[in-house]
Amino acid sequence: MLISSSAHIARGSVIEPGAVIGAQVYIGPFCVITAGVEIGEGTVIASHVVINGQTRIGRNNSIGRYSSIGEVNQDLKYAGEATDVVIGDRNHIGEKATIHRGTVQGRGRTAIGHDNRILNSVHIGHDCVIGNGTLIGNNSGLAGHVELDDAVQIGVMCAIHQFCILGAYAQIADRSGVVQDVPPFVCASGNHALPTGFNQSAVAFLAADIQQQQEIRTFYDRIYHLAMPFDEAKKEAARLAIHYPLLRLFDQFFSRSTRGIIR
């Protein structure tokens, strides 16, 4: 057990031998931190939190009451293999959140990047990959193997089907169920979620030059107003990505998409 002298651990919490607790970490009352967990500098953990397994948490995160991180996943094939959870820096994780470790059949890891806001009672299933700057609303759930690219926004009480990919800057409205992949910048709503428009308020879109903005709008129109076939969309995205940096988001998305896109 390695605990920084500047860490604060409240009375009633249990830190097992083998855990690593960084400088200025605060751990509230009645928490359980098991062997193999590493918690980075400045992270604040509220009361009644359980962190176990091979879990690495970066710097300056906040984790809400009654959350469970690194728990055994719900995949029936899981047999105790040494899989893990890795969380980056400056993430806000709300109360009663659950984040499960990966599986050897998947990536072996559940990974969360930096600067994400994961609100109360959110579930993140095994082998999920979450980028940077995302928002996941209260009571929403990600099934196993879901991928969220940077700056995705998911509303409250949403369900994302296993193996779905949500492209960068996609927006999912409250109470939606997503069962296919959602391309970058696309807004979607309903159960099953359907496209409702284009995210023109995305920071990256607003920062782009007029030509890039027009190319993205045109590409969206071809997919959703002119019903461009999926294979053609992949080729067009690859062609445009050579000249327009933001179109690379579409190219990267289509190269990974296997479930088909929402229409």
Image (spheres, rainbow, N blue to C red):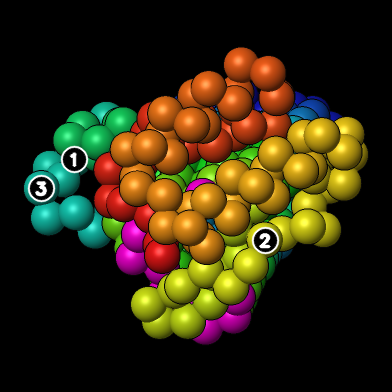
Residue 85 found in image quarter: top left
Mark 2 → mark 3, Cα distance in angstroms: 39 Å
At horizontal 24% and vertical 58% (from top left) the residue drawn is 74
Q: Quadrant of the C terminus?
A: bottom left
What amino acid does circle 1 point to?
Answer: Gly
What amino acid does circle 2 point to?
Answer: Phe
Residue 95: x and y in percent read 63, 70
**Image side of residue 46 versus residue 225, left or right:** right
Tell which tag, 3 or 1, sits nearer the viewer. 3
At horizontal 42% and vertical 50% (from top left) the residue drawn is 228
Which residue has dot 3 on it? 77
Q: Magenta part of the protein: which range?
A: 173-183
For this rendering, which residue is in front, 83 or 136? 136
Q: Quadrant of the N terminus?
A: top right
| Lower sequence index among marks 2 and 1 | 1
Which SS class for mark 2? Answer: strand
Residue 56: x and y in percent read 54, 32
Question: Which class describes the residues within 10 Å of circle 1: few (<14), some (14-19), or many (20+)?
Answer: few
Mark drawn on residue 198:
2
Mark drawn on residue 235:
none
Q: Are marks 3 and 1 in contact (CB under 8 Å)?
A: no
Mark drawn on residue 80:
1
Mark 2 → mark 1, Cα distance in angstroms: 43 Å
Tell which tag, 2 or 1, sits nearer the viewer. 2
Residue at the top extreme of this rendering: 242
- Magenta stretch holds residue 177: yes
Residue 53: x and y in percent read 38, 40
What amino acid does circle 3 point to?
Answer: Lys
Position above or below: 203 against 105: below
Mark 3 → mark 1, Cα distance in angstroms: 9 Å
Position above or below: 195 against 191: above
Question: Which class describes the residues within 10 Å of circle 3: few (<14), some (14-19), or many (20+)?
Answer: few
